[in-house]
Every structure is written in C-alpha cells, then in structure tokens.
C-alpha cells in the first residue's frame, strides 16, 4: 500500500493538490473523497476513511478544493457549483490517468457536493455521504451574523474554525439555487447515508431528508456517539469499514 502526491487542474484552471491512496496490487475500484466546508484533504475524516478503504482494495483520491489546503486559487471566488466542478475535474483526472471512479464519498458539505457531481460522472455506481446536509444552503448558518453586510457590500470577511474567509453575495445566491432534492431523487446510484444522531453541526434530520428523498437501493448507518468531524479514530475506522463492506456489492 502507498500514497502519492497528485496535481491536476481544477474548475478555475488553477492546480489542485491531491493525494492518491493505493492498495497493494491492482485496485478493485477507484473512489473520490470530498472534504468538508473550508477543510482540506488532510483532516482526520478524510485521511482515515481513505486509508480504511485502501485496506479493502479501493484506491482513493482525496484533494483540496480550489483555494483551500495546498490547492491554488482564491477561495473567495469559489462557490458550491465550483466545488462540484472541481469534483468532476478530479474524476476526469482519474479517468485519464488511471480509471474513472465508481465510488464517490463526501463529508459534510462535501457529501452534498458528491450528490450533485454524480450526474456528471457516468461511471459512478455508488455514493456515500458522511454527516452531509440535505441542502447546500445549510452552510449559510455559519455566517448568518454577516449576511446583511454580505448583501449590502457584496462580500464580507467571516471567521470559520478560527480562520478568516471572504464570502461573496454570489456564494449565497449559488447555494440557494441548487436543485438538491431533485438530484438526490434522480441519483441513479446506490446510496449510503452515514450520520451521527448526536451531530451538533449538521443535525441527523438532514440524513432523514436525504434518505427519504432518495430511491432504492439506499442504506442508512448511524455513527453512534461520533462528532461531526469524526475526530475519534474508532469512529472514523468504523465508518470506513462499513463503507468498504457496503461498496463491495456495487463497485
């Protein structure tokens, strides 16, 4: 098993930093992992879930969205739609260099992004979300106190997880315009929804909405006691093992 640095052009033409986790021998399938809002590819959930899947013979590409982590570009000029386009660019890279992904995995807002990106990656057979909001507009709660300033001035600097980010009015318009329920209903892929009943960041009612909207085949697994970021190693390992076992049937 190994890990290799990868770089490819994102949706805005700037290089995106990525890491490809490769199992021993020929991979059974390739997967893409999308990280949470304002996070990066190296957060606990991303690394542990990716490496857990690798142990089951799945190669996983995890990358930083434009303007985050090691990727170039300006985060202030991105939105949910550009995140989805970055995911599609990552799938295009895998298809050209290795093999198209058959599995998409997304954490938090990354979960919403993989649900949206699936339609642009025809090879995908299965999609898994971890602590995902049912609607991308859920993230607007993080800058509710700055919303008036964003609407008035067109943008504002907001502090998220101790770091300052520029949020533009166009970002708000973009997340409000996403037809997420329709995408979930017409997913045309197996769906696994993983969510903690005690998630304080994205309530478990979001999992219910995603699950109820989706058509079969679909499954739900409760990550009992886990926090939103899966900071406890055992929670992340459990999620990876369940995900890998479930994915075998489809990929």
Image: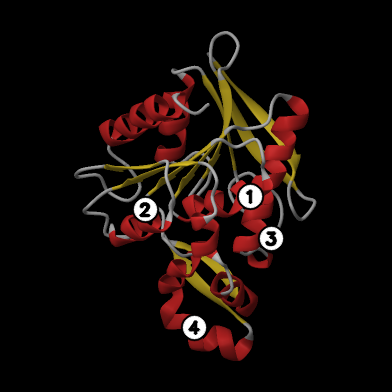
Q: Eyeballing the image, is 167 above or below 10?
A: below
Q: CA distance from mark 4 to mark 1?
A: 31 Å
Q: Is residue 34 left or right of residue 73?
A: left
User: Which numbered disc flags the more N-terminal residue, 2 or 1?
Assistant: 1
**Residue 245 image point, x, y percent:** 38, 25
Judged from this view, the residue extending furthest toward the top is: 25
Q: Secondary structure at mark 4?
A: helix
Task: Say which residue label 4 marks.
Answer: 147
CB contact under 8 Å: marks 2 and 1: no
The answer to whether any part of residue 22 appears in the image is: yes
User: Which numbered disc flags the more N-terminal residue, 4 or 1?
Assistant: 1
Q: Along the line of sight, which residue is nearer the eye, 9 or 178? A: 178
In the image, what residue occupies the spot 55% across and 35% down?
A: 125
Q: CA distance from mark 3 to mark 2?
A: 34 Å
Sort mark 4 into few (<14), some (14-19) or many (20+) by Cα contacts within 10 Å: many
Q: CA distance from mark 4 to mark 3?
A: 20 Å
Task: Say which residue label 1 marks.
Answer: 119
User: Which numbered disc flags the more N-terminal residue, 3 or 2?
Assistant: 3
**Residue 60 image point, x, y percent:** 55, 29
**Residue 34 image point, x, y percent:** 53, 45
In the image, what residue occupies the spot 22% across and 52% down?
A: 197
Sort mark 3 into few (<14), some (14-19) or many (20+) by Cα contacts within 10 Å: some
Q: Nearer the viewer, mark 4 or mark 3?
A: 4
User: Which numbered disc flags the more N-terminal residue, 2 or 4?
Assistant: 4
Q: Nearer the viewer, mark 3 or mark 2?
A: 2
User: Which numbered disc flags the more N-terminal residue, 1 or 3?
Assistant: 3
Task: Say which residue label 3 marks.
Answer: 74
């Amino acid at each position: 098993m190994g890990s290799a640095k990868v770089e490819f052009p994102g949706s805005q033409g700037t290089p995106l930093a990525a890491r490809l986790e490769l199992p021993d021998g020929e991979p059974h399938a390739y997967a893409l992992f999308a990280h949470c809002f304002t996070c990066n590819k190296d957060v606990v959930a991303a690394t542990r879930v990716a490496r857990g899947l690798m142990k089951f013979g799945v190669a996983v590409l995890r990358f930083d969205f434009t303007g985050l982590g090691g990727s170039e570009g300006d985060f202030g000029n991105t939105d949910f739609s550009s995140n989805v386009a970055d995911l599609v660019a990552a799938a295009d890279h895998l298809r050209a260099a290795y093999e198209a992904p058959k599995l998409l995995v997304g954490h938090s807002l990354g979960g919403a992004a993989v649900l949206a990106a699936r339609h642009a990656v025809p090879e995908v057979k299965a999609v898994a979300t971890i602590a995902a909001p049912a609607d991308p507009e859920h993230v607007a709660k993080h800058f509710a106190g700055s919303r008036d300033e964003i609407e008035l001035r067109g943008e504002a600097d907001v502090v998220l997880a101790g770091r300052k980010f520029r949020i533009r009015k166009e970002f708000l318009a973009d997340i409000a315009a996403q037809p997420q329920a329709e995408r979930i209903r017409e997913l045309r892929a197996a769906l696994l929804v993983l969510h903690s009943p005690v998630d304080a960041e994205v309530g478990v009612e979001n999992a219910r909405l995603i699950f109820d909207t989706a058509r079969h085949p679909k499954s739900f697994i409760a990550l009992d006691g886990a926090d939103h970021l899966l900071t406890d190693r055992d929670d992340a390992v459990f999620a990876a093992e369940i995900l890998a076992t479930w994915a075998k049937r489809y990929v």
